[in-house]
């Protein structure tokens, strides 16, 4: 049986974590020291369009014992340029159809 527990924890960040340079692993390490659990679910602010069913499926797969972790991702298959205006994933002298590009 799969059960969702409706409980959330909110913690004020320590001063050393309140920086533009703070990364996810620093936050996770601090949080996991405060909250003892078998499973943690984190959603980043940049994952605005993830839906509840995606999280449910990931948890169900992980809790079945088949996997020890889960993440969400999507296939990116577009023409991309670097900040120096050079192509990132294609040859600009022979531009392929996007469906023929290697997915990133």
Image (spheres, rainbow, N blue to C red):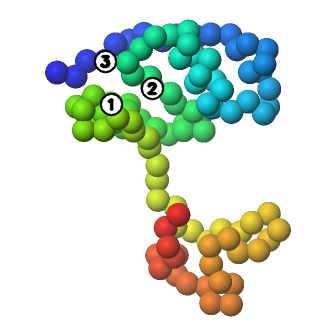
Q: Which mark is residue 4?
A: 3
Q: Looking at the image, can residue 60 be seen?
A: no
The image quadrant that residue 54 belongs to is: top left
Question: In the rendered view, does 28 fall on the left or right side of 63?
Answer: right
- The residue under label 2 is 41
Residue to which mark 1 is pinned = 59
**For numbered disc 2, what is the local secondary structure?**
loop
Q: Which residue shows up at 30% across the image and 38% down it?
A: 67
Secondary structure of residue under mark 3: loop
93, 63: nearer the viewer: 63
Q: CA distance from mark 1 to mark 2?
A: 9 Å
Expressed as whole percent of the image width and height from the top left, the position of residue 10 reads 58, 10
Measured in 3D between alpha carbons, the distance from the residue under mark 3 to the one under mark 2, in whole angstroms, is 12 Å
Q: Which mark is drawn over residue 79?
A: none
* Residue 17 to residue 89: above or below: above
Cβ atoms under marks 1 and 3 closer than 8 Å: no
- Within 10 angstroms of label 3, few (less than 14), some, or many (20 or more) residues? few
Count of all numbered marks drawn on residues in the image: 3
Residue at image coords 70%, 14%: 13
Asked whether disc 1 touches disc 2, contact meaning CB atoms under 8 Å apart, the reply is yes
- Mark sitting earlier along the chain (1/3): 3
**How much space separates mark 1 and mark 3, taking CA atoms?**
10 Å
Task: Give the mark nearest the N terminus, 3 or 2.
Answer: 3
> Could you say which is closer to the camera, residue 61 or residue 54?
61
Q: Secondary structure at mark 1?
A: helix
- Residue 62, can we see it? yes
Give the percent coordinates (x, y) of residue 81. Answer: 71, 69
Query: Sequence order check: which comes first, mark 1 or mark 2?
Result: 2
Disc 2: CA contacts within 10 A as few (<14), some (14-19) or many (>=20): few
Task: Name the residue located 63 percent from the left edge and 32 percent from the top edge.
Answer: 24
């Amino acid at each position: 049986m799969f059960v969702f527990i409706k409980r959330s924890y909110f913690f004020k960040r320590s001063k050393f974590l309140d920086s533009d340079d703070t990364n996810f692993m620093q936050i996770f390490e601090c949080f996991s020291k405060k909250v003892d659990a078998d499973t943690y679910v984190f959603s980043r602010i940049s994952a605005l369009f993830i839906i509840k069913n995606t999280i449910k499926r990931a948890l169900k797969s992980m809790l079945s014992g088949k996997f020890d972790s889960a993440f969400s991702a999507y296939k990116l298959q577009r023409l991309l340029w670097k900040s120096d205006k050079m192509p990132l994933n294609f040859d600009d002298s022979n531009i392929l159809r996007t469906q023929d590009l290697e997915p990133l």
